[in-house]
Image (cartoon, rainbow, N blue to C red):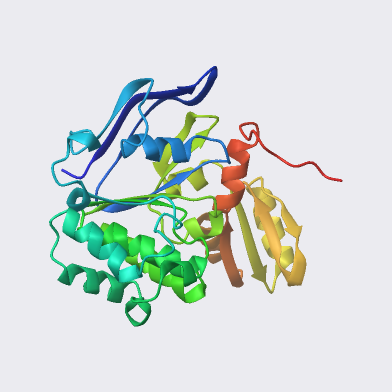
Amino acid sequence: MNRIEIRELTKDHGPHRVVDHLTFDVLPGKVTGFLGPNGAGKSTTLRLLLGLDRPTSGSVTIGGSRFAELRDPLRRVGALLDPQAAHGGRRARDHLLALAVSNGIPPARVDSVLEQAGLAAVARRRVGTYSLGMRQRLGVAAALLGDPGVLLLDEPTNGLDPEGIIWIRELMCGLAAEGRTVFVASHLMAESASFVDHLVVLGRGKLLADSSLEEFIEARSTPRVRLRTSEPGRLEAALAREGFQLSAADGGRWTVDGIRAERIGSLAAREGIPVLELTDERASLEQAYLDLTADRTPYSATAA
């Protein structure tokens, strides 16, 4: 019921193709990160999902229906696309109350989501007096208002302080754990790595990757082990017999390329060589992402 299905989705703006035959699913029970350089087509795809724009071809459905066909859309789908959407002259509680009344949602739910978003104490202040982070919280509160099974969030951590970032991260993971579909567009790689389970990556409107976070990083990492030992000479000789080279690193540590920590641990145990530290190194999400999208970034700066 909460599955998002995108099939051959294409959107042209004049001669420019913004979204190019996208096909992928966003599944319940996990947080799916939607990544890509500026201009990759992420925001356009979200707009097509919400019926704010019409596709040139292809289809996008939520639970088998187009968004425009949903009888109770706010109860099915909650979305945050622009934290500046709420009118600055309206009080925060009144903004949510208008949404609730127009969608048949009990007014009591307004106070519940304001509390959940940490805005209960400032609910009667005008939105125009809110900081960016407070507006972001209000946008999340609006997305949660109908207690929907699907959440679409565009850059939800933008403007939030550290406490707010932890809150939104735990919120998204908690909603996914309840079996909801959580689809999050972001360009913050380090932050995304802390909460996403699955990744969909775009580049120039095309699908570049659709995999779990672990698989995405693993596919773009060269095996390397970092270690410390009190007997590097013995370990170097043992590794050489297996066709591997021990290389000096910083802080009295050593590295070995092309091997996993498990194999070195077994080798060291067999030879009776003490190992004080042993860990696999792999690319970060940011490194793996940059490796994938290096030639798919339409706007990139050059060094001075």
Question: Residue 118 at what x, y percent from top left?
Answer: 36, 76
Where 21 sits versus 159, above or below? Answer: above
Q: Which corner quadrant of the image does residue 220 belong to?
A: top right
Q: Residue furthest right?
A: 304
Q: Residue furthest top?
A: 15
The residue closer to the viewer here, 22 or 70, is 70
Q: Which corner quadrant of the image does residue 58 belong to?
A: top left
Question: Residue 238 at what x, y percent from top left?
Answer: 65, 56
One can see residue 267 in this view:
no
Where 277 sits versus 34, above or below? Answer: below
Left or right for 86, reference 294 = left
Question: Residue 90 at what x, y percent from top left?
Answer: 37, 65
One can see residue 52 in this view:
yes
Where 70 sits versus 158, above or below? Answer: above
Which residue is drawn at the image coordinates 64% and 61% (left, top)? Answer: 226
Where 101 sits versus 259, above or below? Answer: below
Question: Residue 196 at what x, y percent from top left?
Answer: 41, 54
